[in-house]
Amino acid sequence: MIHEVNEALRALLVRDVLDGTDVEVRFDAPTKDWASRRNRAALNVFLYDIRESLAQRRFGEVSVHDDDGTVVARKPLTRRFTLSYLVSAWTAKAEDEHRILSGVLACLVATDEVDSTLLTGSLAAVGEPVQVTVGAPPKSDKNAADIWPALGGELKAALDVVVTAPLAPGTETAAARPVLEPLRLRSRLKR
C-alpha cells in the first residue's frame, strides 16, 4: 500500500504542480550525501513516519455476497494508516524552492482526498478515500523540524504532509453454506 500511496502522490504532484517543468519527484532520504549527488531540480517527498490511525479504527467484519445475494465470505474491515512525509524542494536558488513549495501547498490545500483516478492496486480495489492533510500542527511526539538533524542535514523549508490511506488486512474467510433443504423433525415416543 505504501508504494501505491507514493505513486498517487507522484501522479498528483506531477499533474497539478510540476507538469511542464524539469523538476523530478524523489522519495529518497534527503541526506547530505543525497543532496551532494543531486544534479537537477527535485521535489523530495520523504516518508518519515507510519502509524495506524487509531481514531479511525473500526472492528468487525463485512459480508461478501454473490450475485444472488447469498453471503459467501466474510472479510475484516479495512484499517487506516497515516503516512507522514517531509516535502522539500531542491534547486540552485531558495526563491525557486519556495515557488515550488508554494505550488505544492496550493495543490494539497485544495486536495482533501486523492483523486480516485490516481489510485492503483489495492488502494483502488478497496474503494475508500485516501485523505491528505498539509501543514497541520505536529503532535507532541512528531516534529518535522527534528528530522533534518537526524538526516545529517541543515534545516530547510519543507511541508509536513500526512496521507491517511486504507489497508485491507488479511483474507476473506469462507462463510458456511446456506441451508437449502427444509428442516425435518422426527420424534419417537418411548413406551
Image: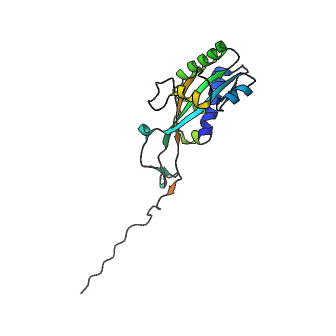
Measured from the top left, where is residue 71 in percent x and y? 47, 54
Task: Compare residues 33 and 21 and report the one nearer the observer.
Answer: 33
x 58%, y 31%: residue: 150
- Residue 126, by quadrant, is top right
Query: Going 45% across and 61% down the picture, which residue do you hit?
Result: 178
Quarter of the image with the C terminus in it: bottom left
Left or right: 112, with 34 as reference point: left
Q: Residue at x 44, y 30 (%)?
A: 140
In the image as oriented, which residue stretches furthest toward the top? 95
Residue at the farthest bottom position: 191
**Residue at 56 percent of width and 23 percent of height:** 159
Residue 8 position, x and y percent, is 62, 32
Q: Between 174 and 146, which is closer to the camera in this rendering?
A: 146
Looking at the figure, which quarter contains the N terminus? top right
- Give the side of residue 113 with respect to residue 44, left or right: left
Which is more toward the observer, 36 or 38? 36
Q: In the picture shown, does residue 155 fall above or below 168?
A: above
Looking at the image, which residue sits at the far left? 191
Answer yes or no: is residue 10 visible. Answer: yes
